[in-house]
Image (cartoon, helix red, strand yellow):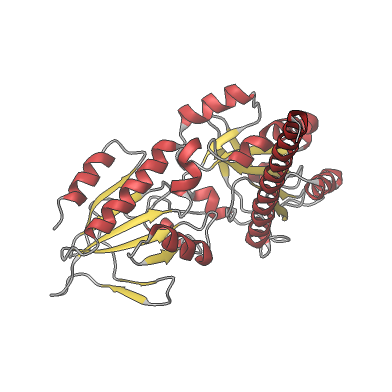
Amino acid sequence: MSIRLVRWMKTSLLTLLCSITLMQMAHATDDYSADGERRAKSAGENLVGTPAPQMTVKTIDGKEIDLAEVYGKKPVYIKFWATWCVPCREQMQGFEEIYEKYGEQVQVIAINTGISDNVKSVTAFRKKVGLTMPITIDNGELARAFQLRVTPQHLLIDKSGKFAYFGHVDDKEFHRALDEVVAEKPSQQAVINPTFVDNNSGYQVGDKVSDMTLSTIDNTNLDVKFNTPTSKKVGMVFFGPWCEWYLEETEPTTSKACTEVRELLEQKSKSSEVQWVTVSTNLWSSINDLNDYRKSYGTTLPIVFDKDSSLFKLFGVNQLPTITLIDSEGKVTMKSSIQDGDFSQALEIISSFK
């Protein structure tokens, strides 16, 4: 066999392998996009056609957007996003182009989820990408109001103040929906939608927690009772099954924290002092995802899927991971997240448990 033929065969084989790899990557991306679209549609299926809530949104520049003054006059386009979210990054240039194209015809609001983000990271990202639309950072309140399930997640509110569209991908279907709400005539009557009221603070250090019954992904109930002879300390860890692997490159500090917490809890899982339970976000999560997570990482602690975000709301949690400790009398003695300065100290406290 000639040297030229061997080289040709090697080159052809390498080209074929590269093509197969690229096809697999494209297929995986398509799968994630389709899954994200399905989750976003599912989140909005009971909201489309219903009145959107009235609320005032404060931007990172200190300006306020009163949606009550917008409804009836022009549509609203909201996109939830995060600086560490890969598809969010991919959509941002198109998002900016939409804002520049429609100008005053559409009230555009970019809602950063606030998860592993803050004013510093969001401002730096805005400058790097060249975003000019109004941006706000959520504390969990807006995510609950607009049923956030994926990132990015965008939604449209028509000129009558009703939810018109939910989606994940920036495709032709979305742009048709956007054109439709823009083309609508303004409402001839005053739009008076219900006002959104949400107490995001939840349980804080020093507060007393009521008895709870938590349902795990195995359909077993965990009865958490305080002030009884057999009551223990309770440790609740709020997490996401994607935190470790997805954020490994785009937000490594948070990824490392999620790994550290999981490994530490597994070491302390047999502790006689504390009843541990892990609570999963509903963002990019499902019971199937949590079963895969448990299998992949070999976790043994009870997992509760917070499908409607009620536990995250009850405990005022928006960051992943967040650790909350409750004493046997039901008093919150510690609450710390990766965004807090005392997070390392919180891990030391957990390490001291026997």
Q: Which image quadrant: the N terminus?
A: top right
* Residue 141 percent across, percent down from the top left: 50, 49
Q: Residue at x 82, y 50 (%)?
A: 188
Q: Residue at x 81, y 44 (%)?
A: 175
Q: Is residue 61 above or below residue 330?
A: above
- Front residue of 338/105: it is 338
Q: With 344 as the anchor, is 141 left or right in this view?
A: right
* Residue 105 percent across, percent down from the top left: 79, 36
Q: Is residue 247 above or below residue 327?
A: above
Q: Residue at x 45, y 39 (%)?
A: 116
- Front residue of 76/195: it is 76
What is the tally of numbered marks visible in this picture? 0
- Front residue of 168/298: it is 298
Which picture quadrant has residue 300?
bottom left
Q: Is residue 296 above or below residue 1?
A: below
**Residue 275 visible somewhere in the drawing:** yes
Farthest-out residue, front: 1
Q: Residue at x 67, y 54 (%)?
A: 31
* Residue 341 percent across, percent down from the top left: 29, 35
* Residue 61 percent across, percent down from the top left: 54, 27
- Front residue of 219/80: it is 219
Which picture quadrant has residue 76?
top right
**Residue 61 visible somewhere in the drawing:** no
Q: Which image quadrant: the C terminus?
A: bottom left
Farthest-out residue, bottom: 220
Q: With 158 as the anchor, is 335 left or right in this view?
A: left
Q: Is residue 131 above or below residue 279?
A: above
Q: With 88 as the anchor, is 351 left or right in this view?
A: left
